[in-house]
Amino acid sequence: MPLKNFLLDCLFPKKCYGCGASETWLCPKCFLILKKYQGEVPRALEDAGDLIMAGQYQDPILRSLITAFKFASNRELSVPLFAFLKSALDNKIIISGLSRNHWQNIFIIPVPLHKSRQKWRGYNQSELIAREISNYYGWPLSLDLKKIKKTKIQAELNEEARLNNQTGAFIWTGGNLAEHDVILVDDIITSGATISEAAKTLTQAGAKRVIKVAVAKG
């Protein structure tokens, strides 16, 4: 075990965020009782047909996992969060009558943070989840979607302000996305304003289809 990991395990021993069981961030028992997404469509999304969400942020265990993932620098939580999200992704593949091999022209793209926020946090939590998806399914990851507008924190705004806050926030710096589908990844979708604006930018760049994916509905 690398020295850094050993020291971290001594200072912050692994305990399940649900029941406190040792040696794991999320035990099998607590994994099975995570509350699944209930189907409420985020208000800012015009098209909910290409929407995949795994759970509900109101679930206390899932909320604790996501909070620690975003604000307590526990990057390892990308693994159990992806494991939870994977079932929703697999269900979409089955319902669509597709297999992984048939989804050829796909890019995995995380919703980016503004460079100042990413520098402050040290990483983009959505990118870590997107990397897990890319590694598991073998779909290429692209980081060419950039956030150029330093927006206010969505959770601190009312509904109307959230919608206006993200306007013009993103640009696409990659090549033409024609003939490509995109899986656009975020950790939480609440009003849907952020991911909707990001999806709009990708559609304008030529994306044939933008599938919006998140671990939880906020």
Image (cartoon, rainbow, N blue to C red):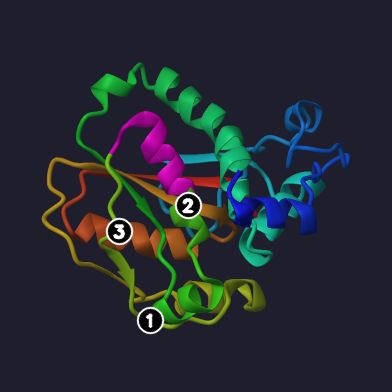
- Within the magenta stretch, is there residue 136? yes
User: In which image quadrant can residue 36 be found?
Assistant: top right
Image marks 1 and 2: residues in contact by CB distance under 8 Å: no
- Within the magenta stretch, is there residue 20? no
Q: Is residue 180 left or right of residue 145?
A: left
Tell me, for residue 143, which label it has, or none: 3
Residue 123: x %, y % from top left: 49, 65
Q: Residue at x 68, y 51 (%)?
A: 6
Judging by the rendered image, the residue that carries numbered circle 1 is 149
Q: Residue at x 36, y 75 (%)?
A: 169
Q: Please state which of residues 155 and 186 is positioned toward the viewer in this rendering.
A: 186
Q: Magenta region: which residues?
A: 129-139
Image marks 3 and 2: residues in contact by CB distance under 8 Å: no
Alpha carbon of mark 1 to alpha carbon of mark 3: how far? Answer: 16 Å
Residue 12: x %, y % from top left: 77, 56
Q: Residue at x 25, y 61 (%)?
A: 144
Image marks 1 and 3: residues in contact by CB distance under 8 Å: no
Tell me, for residue 128, which label it has, or none: 2
Q: Magenta segment, principal secondary structure?
A: helix
Q: Check disc 2 and give the amino acid type.
A: Leu
Residue 182: x %, y % from top left: 29, 45
Q: Which sits earlier in the primary sequence, circle 3 or circle 2?
A: 2
Q: Is residue 155 above or below residue 199?
A: below
Q: Which sits earlier in the primary sequence, circle 1 or circle 3?
A: 3
Alpha carbon of mark 3 to alpha carbon of mark 2: how far? Answer: 11 Å
Which one is closest to the eye, mark 1 or mark 3?
3
Alpha carbon of mark 1 to alpha carbon of mark 2: how far? Answer: 22 Å
Q: Check disc 3 and give the amino acid type.
A: Leu
Q: Is residue 182 above or below residue 120?
A: above
